[in-house]
Amino acid sequence: MHIPDAFIPIWQGAIYWIIALVFVYLSLRWAKNELNEEKLPLVAVLAAGIFALQSFNLPVSMGTSGHLVGGALVAIILGSPFAAVFILTLVLIVQGIMFGDGGITTMGANILNMGVVGGFVGFYSFKGLKAATGSMPVSAFIAAWLACLIPALCASVELWLAGTFPLQAGMIAMGLYHAIIGVVEGVITVAAIYLIVSVRPDMVDKGVMPAKVGAVA
Amino acid sequence: MIDNKTLIVGGLIIAILVGVVAVFMASSDPDGLESTALIIQGGKTLTGPTPPDAEIVENMEGKFAYSAPMPDYSLGEGMGSMGGILAIIGGTVLAFLVVIGLVYALKIAGKKNPPNGVQ
């Protein structure tokens, strides 16, 4: 769902850039204060992994493909929506500048959708669902699904405001395709969490762990 | 538990493997956003296949145009899949290095200007 330069007028792109920069600033503050050198290897590996995953377009049927976003995974593993903003912003900068995936004037909108909306939706829906159900996999799956679908719907609203997509047709198509991609996003997110928890439990946010482990420790 | 070196090496290997497999296995169908654009421009239907000649019309009037050095994760037709693999590996390693570099820059800047202003 990387919006290219052609799809949004420059002045609207500038507005999304300004909003995105506020969150980027906050994410830099998060990185400065919360990221210690012990966690840095995991954060850097996550950025590399998300770059690679986003280059993998999976078939969705209906003549469409889609790739994972990864915002929920990062926010859940590192325990902050700003972790997603931080990593997704850097990945989007590399994609946009080096590979032309996503525009330059629209990079703010892409950061806003996948980093900010994806990160916040992923993190807080995981937190809420985990408190309600107590199940990490169920909560992470639904959170990742939502963190794929809702940014896509945000993109369709932005493209409607830009005059590129009609509202209803855009929402239906974007919603349908990303509801399907979101299922894969959910499965991969849960699998990646299990993998990371098993190899480096010390680097993972405590919110991911089963409640009883937290109580014992 | 694995140590940091294994985490970094193992993590980068997994990421690069995913990217390399993507060069050969990734779907060539347009992604969700491009598909939606095709539907709106009449190039495809919501649930139908994408015709091989379908092309998105881009109205560049008053828009910013930028040419990336490695568009579409490739180094051009002549390089074929080898170019794709090199582009993906380059991007994956670059994403890794950018994070490390930025975090170190933030930490160095933070040490020069302590938040409480006490030196």
Image: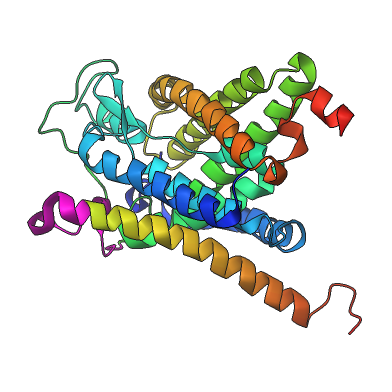
| Quadrant hosting residue B43 | top left
The image quadrant of residue B17 is top left
- Residue A80 can be seen in this image: no
Vertical side of A170 occupied by A42: above or below: below
Instruction: Report the number of discs.
Output: 0
Which of the two residues, B24 or B8, is positioned nearer the viewer here? B8
Who's the residue at 42% across and 25% down the image? A181
- The residue sitting at 40% across, 49% down in the picture is B13
Decide if residue B97 is on the left or right side of residue A26. Answer: left
Towards the viewer: A6 or B93: B93
Res. B45 visible in picture: yes
- From which residue to which does the magenta span run? B66-84
Q: How is the image coloured?
A: rainbow
Residue B83 shown in magenta: yes
**What x and y, as percent, mark residue A164?**
36, 38
Image x and y of residue A162, in percent = 43, 43
A63 sits to left or right of A172? left
| B30 with respect to A161 (left or right) | left
Q: Is residue A7 left or right of residue A26?
A: left
* Quadrant the N terminus of chain A occupies: top left
The residue lying at 87 percent from left, 29 percent from top is A216
Q: Is residue A56 magenta?
A: no
* Vertical relation: A12 (above or below) A28: above
Please state the horizontal and vertical placement of residue B119, each as a whole percent of the image: 89, 85
Q: Residue at x 60, y 52 (%)?
A: B3
Q: Is residue B74 above or below residue A59?
A: below
Residue A167 position by quadrant: top left
For the C terminus of chain A, the image quarter is top right
x, y percent for residue A125: 69, 27
